[in-house]
């Protein structure tokens, strides 16, 4: 996949009612890689991978609705896993995609949910905006929660949505725009009260906006669940959700 293919990749996103924007695809093309399937001169499928230091993240497995159940997903997975090599691979599977991933040796880690949240919110008295100078310290804290160094990804989120990047002494959150709704995540906090404080702060700063959040199950946040999905791993030991991870970045990035 090249940058010139982004409009066709977005067409696949829209056909599946996914939330991604062009900037999401650029993350993969600039820092990882992606493959597209082409039939009759048209792009009919995609898959992307994003390397971290301890594992690779796989996502954006999309097949045009008119070309499904024809083996395209299998061929895309083969190409992507060949490119990734021996490093452990993680992904977040929809119920529709889960059988394909199991055929390639992926096993369960833990359940997540797509949810949404909205409300009047309330100012978090100790919250302050995240500044680029804060990122090294946040990335160091974040390593334990995520299990890999995603400092470059956090920096990109801050660039894209500084109005959704907040911190206290005990918590931090980032966000990004979306085609359907903006998304909050990751949201990391030492306890539920700290997580609620930053979430309410984001809501207060954007009155009337409905946010997407992807959270481990069960969630202690007051959010409305829409559908489940499943974190899976191939080539490494399964883990459980970190107790300080109240929302993930999203299935695109982990």
Image (cartoon, rainbow, N blue to C red):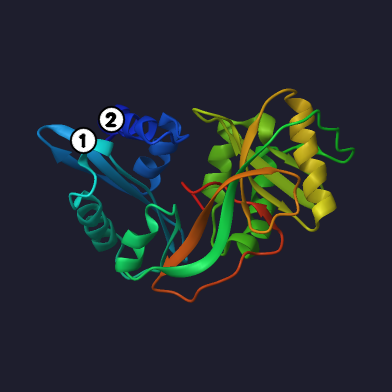
Q: Quadrant of residue 5?
A: top left
Q: Pointer 2: residues within 10 angstroms few (<14), some, or many (20+)? A: some
Residue behind mark 1: 43
Q: CA distance from mark 2 to mark 1?
A: 6 Å
Task: Find residue 94 and report its horizontal and vertical position in percent.
Answer: 44, 52
Residue behind mark 2: 8
Q: First in sequence, mark 2 or 1: give its number.
A: 2
Residues at discs 2 and 1 in contact (Cβ within 8 Å): yes
Image mark count: 2
For this orientation, the residue located farthest to the top is: 208
Task: Find residue 191 and report its horizontal and vertical position in percent.
Answer: 81, 57
Q: Residue at x 77, y 49 (%)?
A: 195
Q: Residue at x 77, y 50 (%)?
A: 171
Left or right: 18 with respect to 129? left
Secondary structure found at label 2: helix
Left or right: 204 with respect to 83? right
Left or right: 158 with respect to 76? right
Q: Quadrant of residue 213?
A: top right
For this orientation, the residue located farthest to the bottom is: 237
Is the residue 109 above or below the residue 192 in the image?
below
Secondary structure found at label 1: strand
- Nearer to us in this view, 69 or 58: 69
Left or right: 198 with respect to 10? right
């Amino acid at each position: 996949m090249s940058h010139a293919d982004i409009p066709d990749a977005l067409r696949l996103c829209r056909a599946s009612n996914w939330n991604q924007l062009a900037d999401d695809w650029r993350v993969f093309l600039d820092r990882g890689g992606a493959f597209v399937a082409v039939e009759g001169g048209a792009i009919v499928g995609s898959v992307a991978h994003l390397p971290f230091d301890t594992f690779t993240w796989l996502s954006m497995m999309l097949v045009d609705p008119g070309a499904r159940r024809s083996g395209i997903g299998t061929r895309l997975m083969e190409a992507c896993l060949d490119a990734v090599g021996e490093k452990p691979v993680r992904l977040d599977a929809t119920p529709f995609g889960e059988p394909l991933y199991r055929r390639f040796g992926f096993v369960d880690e833990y359940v997540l949910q797509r949810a949404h949240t909205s409300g009047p919110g309330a100012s978090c008295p100790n919250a302050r905006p995240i500044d680029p100078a804060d990122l090294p310290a946040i990335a160091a804290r974040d390593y334990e929660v995520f299990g890999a160094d995603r400092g470059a990804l956090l920096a990109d989120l801050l660039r894209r949505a500084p109005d959704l990047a907040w911190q206290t002494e005990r918590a931090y959150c980032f966000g990004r725009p979306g085609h359907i709704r903006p998304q909050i995540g990751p949201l990391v906090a030492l306890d539920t009260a700290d997580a609620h404080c930053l979430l309410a702060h984001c809501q207060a700063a954007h009155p009337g906006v409905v946010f997407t959040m992807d959270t481990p199950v069960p969630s202690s946040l007051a959010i409305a669940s829409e559908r489940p999905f499943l974190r899976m791993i191939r080539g490494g030991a399964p883990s459980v959700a970190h107790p300080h991870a109240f929302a993930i970045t999203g299935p695109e990035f982990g």
